[in-house]
Amino acid sequence: MREGDYIFRETDVADYQRISDLLTRCDFGPKRPEWLRWKYLDNPLGRARVFVIENSSNKELEGLVAFEPRLFQNGDATPFVVMHAVEGFLKPEIRGKGLYPQLLQHAMTTIDAPMLGFPNKRAERIHIQCGWQILSTDERWYFPVAAGNHLKQWPLRILAPLVNFLSRAYATLWLGREKPEIQMKSMTKAAKDYPARDNRIQGVRSAAFLNWRFINNPMRPYSAYEFFENGESVGYCVYALDGKSAELFDFSVERHSRTCLRMLVEHCRKRGITHLLFRGSGLALWKFGFVKWGAGGSYIAYNLPQGAYYLTFGDSDW
């Protein structure tokens, strides 16, 4: 597709070095070649669909949008592919010219699959103009781990031991105590596919996806742990550190949810983490003692099936 001085087109592997050069110059996204190969080529479901704006006069790339294939499931129905928006970028000098909506529209007419967008208020506004709809709110849930570690300045720091004691008591009240038959071990490789937690529409948690998305991710270090009951795997969790907090990207267990959460909280306490943050949609974490505080925009969708969705931070942040 051509509009004035710009060409809107889908890329192939031959364009990836130029894409890497563009992202490196602008310090954005998977700017290292090995990051780009991992993100755009190594997905077990197939390579990403990447669309660019190309200057017709000098052939320079000016911006891009990228979509990753992700399997979703709806109860016992056959899983279906959703194209997940993972990148949206324009060079600063061409912003405000209405080019991004044209690029997005070109991608929408080329890709024959439902689409899911990341929670970003600026992206939300543009995508809605192009026919996307708000799917749900990006909720933020907090759980205190060792909240006293926030108190570094005198005289508040004298209260830190008391606040940490209260944090531990809070965890016991909501999650109970650890049980010897439940163990939490580092997960260096996912060896099994994990079932859906309920009948809501949600991403498929296959071993291939987990290993690609989290275990072998070169862009950001994740901590992945598996929970066992008498040697049998019952679930896993993935988090990433952000200063003194732990951002919980996914937590999926078949049973013993409270005990597994308590083990995660104690693990984080030993690492000096002040609190857990779990973002997503349809989480309902109040029953585990999490406090809902604030929101980060909305999940947006195009041609997604109707229904109740369960989405976690791992479904949105890349």
Image: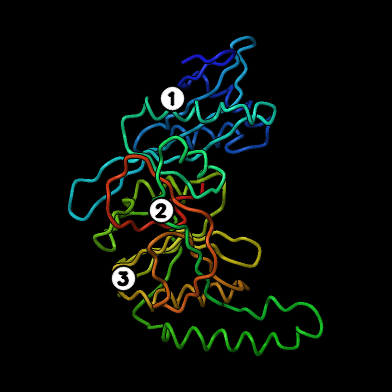
User: Farthest residue in the top direction?
Assistant: 57
Residue at label 2?
189
Give residue 219's position: percent from left, percent from top. Answer: 57, 44
- Residue under the image location 57 percent in, 76 percent down: 269
Q: Given the image, on which type of amino acid does mark 1 rest?
A: His
Q: Secondary structure at mark 2?
A: loop
Cα distance, mark 1 to mark 2? 38 Å
- Residue under the image location 34 percent in, 80 percent down: 181
Residue 106, labelled with which disc? Answer: 1
User: Farthest residue in the right direction?
Assistant: 154
Task: Indicate whether 71 appears above or below 155.
Answer: above
- Residue under the image location 53 percent in, 66 percent down: 277
Residue at label 3?
231
Kindly report which numbered mark, 3 or 1, lies closer to the viewer in this rendering. Answer: 1
Q: Residues within 10 Å of mark 1 (few under 14, many from 20)?
A: some
Kindly report which numbered mark, 1 or 2, lies closer to the viewer in this rendering. Answer: 1
Task: Indicate whether 48 appears above or below 3.
Answer: below
Give residue 224's position: percent from left, percent from top. Answer: 46, 60
